[in-house]
Amino acid sequence: MKEKDNKLTFRGGILFSLIPVIIYVFFCVVLFIGFKAFNMEALAVGGFLALLVGGIFCTSYADFWDSVIRGISSITAVSVVVILLLVGMFSQLIKICGLSGGFVWMANAMGIHGGLFVAFTFFATCIVSTATGSSIGTMFIAFPIFYPAGMILGANEMFMAGSIVSGAIFGDNLAPISDTTIASASTQQFHDGRPADIGGVVSSRLKYSAVAGAITLVIFAVFGGAGGSSQGGAIDAVSNPVSLIMLVSVVIMLVVSTKTRNIFEGILVGLGLGTAVGLAAGLFSFDAVFANDAANNAAVGFLIDGVNNILPTCALVISVFGIMGVLNDAGMLNLIADKILTSKMAQTDAGAELICMAGIALTTVLLGDVTSASILTFGPILNRIGSAKHIHPYRRANLLDGTANSLPAIVPFLSVFVFIGAALTGLSPVVVACGTIYGFALFGVFLVAVLTGWGRRAE
């Protein structure tokens, strides 16, 4: 391996270190806009192909891959992958219990319709996405259940679709088991090198999410029924009210994770309690937990499925950290951070945070609104800037995740969230984006927080 002090050099200069990023961005554009495909496996393929081709422009292909491996083997990368594998099991546990169907049963039993049902859907989807930690998974769970019910109960189609996407993004931003929460916390370090703990990040993030969520809830309740036409009659619920009992394990998992500031303890308690409650309530049998499929010589169950489902995301994370290893050893990350730090605008904390918001937003849009990838990409730059300005790692993690999961995440024709919403409803991407009120509200909340200094603290 090359000496640590030696920079990775490229034919044509340091700017050529960005070639893997450019290739990956091009792959995202082709994948989302051209193929309209939205899977993590393909994104991971794009990342690894970018590395294979990008290394050609380095003066030493061996040194290039030394840097890739160094990025992948960093404590941050390993921590993110391990946590994701564990949360995948808990996420799958919640999915098989039909929690969203329980909420539809509740709304129907309470006689909620029109704008109130849109607001209720947003609230329920927030809980589901916080419980599963998966925005995309939540949308595939929630749209087939909530959207048709909303059309029956007089909801406006734009706000109905937007409420589900909004709720999915809410959980992606706040849940301690979300890939973006894990990534944003892990990339921001204290001065002693420790990554920001997830529990502390979530505790400090709650106020921003709560304010944006409250604004969104009111707007949906007031305007969500405009133009809707109630068809009357009861909903033939694809639901099971008993599934709502799983909220107990979700709440306890969140409390333990936040109070102990240890995500591993939270997952252990949530997974153990959730399995026991689900079995006792008859939501699934023990075979659904872990069993032998003798016909196919395979082990099956939600524990296996949880790990299998999260593996593509882990592969994406690995490829992105490989790219970050190259940019770090080439000096590109430091160069970008230095340019920002020496700019006139960055002489104040508010100015530095505003530039970082712009950088996060641009990165998110370029990467097809794959927020986990954009957070991992811009996170090291924000870490360098925030550390130099003595901004607390919690604040930096919140700014990183909050900006990525706001307006940049819902740009029509670029956003994976909007594309999925459009595909599952038949609405245009512009309509779905306009109805995703939480994206607008969260961006506004963080913009105000930066300009006023609300929530800013020094390390």
Image (cartoon, rainbow, N blue to C red):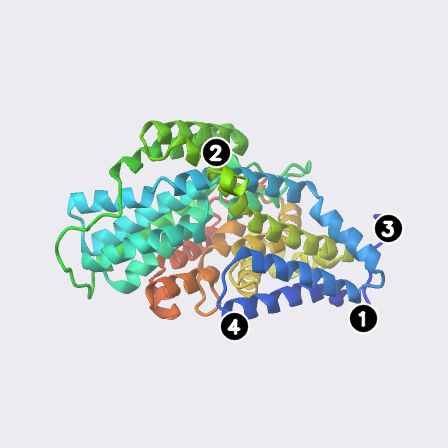
Say which label, 2 or 3, has the lower sequence index. Answer: 3
Amino acid marked by disc 4:
Gly
Q: Quadrant of the C terminus?
A: top right
Q: Secondary structure at mark 1?
A: loop
**Disc 4 versus disc 3: distance between alpha carbons?**
40 Å
In the rendered image, residue 406, in percent from the top left (x then y), is placed at 45, 57
Of the residues tagged 4 and 3, which is closer to the observer? Answer: 4
The residue wearing badge 1 is 12
Which of pointers 1 and 4 indicates the residue nearer the eye?
4
Measured in 3D between alpha carbons, the distance from the residue under mark 2 to the one under mark 3, in whole angstroms, is 46 Å
The 10 Å Cα crowd at callout 2, few under 14, some 14 to 19, many 20 or more, is: some
Callout 2: SS: loop
**Residue occupied by mark 3:** 2
Reading the image, the residue beneath label 2 is 290
Amino acid, disc 1: Gly
Question: Contact, CB < 8 Å: mark 2 with mark 3?
Answer: no
